[in-house]
Amino acid sequence: MSTSNTQSRAESFIAALRRAAKDRGKMAALRRAFSPHTQMDAWPVIADLGGDIQQPVYATVAAIYATHPVESKAANFGATCRQIALAGSGDTKLPESHERRFRRLIAADSSAQLGELLRAWIRLAASKGVGVNYEKLFMDLWNWDWRADDIRVRWAADFWPARKIEELPLPEEAQP
């Protein structure tokens, strides 16, 4: 599927979610998409918002959006996870618990498994007041089953950004 087509799907679905965000009944129904036992309660709302209920990404994104509709312009979900991990701490060192949780997230074998793991991250984002770039997340979830390795690398690069290497002083014996 072309990137522009996926992007237009993401943009239109997230725009529909934004319009529905004030409707508490719709948001409650969308949160029910998390559970396989109650997800059918979300399907009419997802379809009404223009989502294809045969594509699980719509239910996943709708459920997490309904849980935490705060948005950001983060480059990707790896950057969001970094913000979550560092929120409230004055330190730039990532807590080991968040690193382990992030490793499990990027190790997901399928978009369905990834969707299950995202729920905990979204709850953390809500508790720490960190927004999510839902359009980028939709596109990454849409493409996960085909381009997971590329997406993993992008997310990991933003979760563990490279440090700038400062010029180290030469050892005394090597100085001119």
Image (spheres, rainbow, N blue to C red):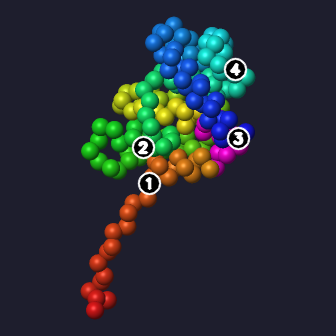
Task: Pick whichever of labels 2 and 4 is earlier in the sequence.
Answer: 4
Quarter of the image for residue 115 reads: top right
Q: Secondary structure at mark 4?
A: loop
As for residue 96 lying within the magenta part, the answer is: no
Q: Which residue is mark 4?
A: 53
Q: Which residue is mark 3?
A: 2
Q: CA distance from mark 2 to mark 1?
A: 9 Å
Q: CA distance from mark 4 to mark 1?
A: 36 Å
Q: Which residue is mark 1?
A: 161
Q: Residue at x 54, y 11 (%)?
A: 26
Q: Nearer the viewer, mark 2 or mark 3?
A: 3
Task: Pick whichever of labels 2 and 3 is earlier in the sequence.
Answer: 3
Q: Residue at x 63, y 32 (%)?
A: 8
Bounds of the magenta segment: 139-149
Task: Pick whichever of labels 1 and 3 is earlier in the sequence.
Answer: 3
Q: CA distance from mark 1 to mark 3?
A: 28 Å
